[in-house]
Image (cartoon, rainbow, N blue to C red):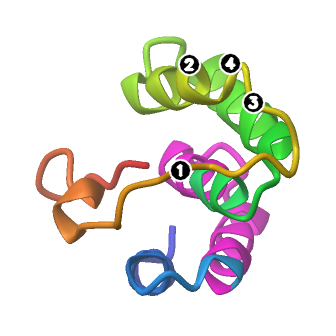
Amino acid sequence: MNNSLAQQAIQKALSGNWDEALELNKEILDSDPNNTDALNRTARAYAELGKIELAKKTAKKVLVIDPFNTIALKAFDKWKSMKNGEAYKSEPVKPQLFLEEPGKTIL
């Protein structure tokens, strides 16, 4: 995985540039389609953009790869009753939300 792209994607998310964050994560997924970190970030970006069905689909893909992925489990649970276009009420993004443990990003 390209750590530079991941860092750029995280920075775009932190500044609320969800379209750009989404594109950077998709670029990571082009070369590593099973990258659960990028998939989780992609799901979050979709949710922030009101594309709830794509967010859920992406979270499900994470769970196929890693059935115990707590980030995807929590996100899917949060989004399961929502529909496309429905306002996703997110909290302001804090940098520490992207750190699960050193060297590991989360949704």
Cα separation between marks 1 and 4: 26 Å
Q: Which residue is mark 4?
A: 64
Q: Amino acid at mark 4?
A: Val
Q: Is residue 27 above or below residue 68?
A: below
Badge 1 vs badge 3, beta-carbon distance below 8 Å: no
Q: Which residue is mark 3?
A: 82
Q: Earlier in the sequence, mark 2 or mark 1?
A: 2
Q: Which residue is mark 1?
A: 89
Q: Which residue is mark 2?
A: 77
Q: Is residue 60 above or below residue 26?
A: above
Residue 98 belongs to the span the image colors magenta: no
Badge 3 vs badge 4, beta-carbon distance below 8 Å: no
Residue 84 vs residue 59, the one in the foreground? 84
Q: Which residues are magenta?
A: 20-43
Q: Position of residue 55 (x, y in %)?
A: 73, 43
Q: Earlier in the sequence, mark 1 or mark 4?
A: 4
Q: Amino acid at mark 3?
A: Met
Report the residue that reaches farthest toward the top: 67
Q: Position of residue 102 (x, y in %)?
A: 11, 55
What residue is at 73 percent from the left and 79 percent from the top? 23
What residue is at 32 percent from the left and 55 percent from the top? 105
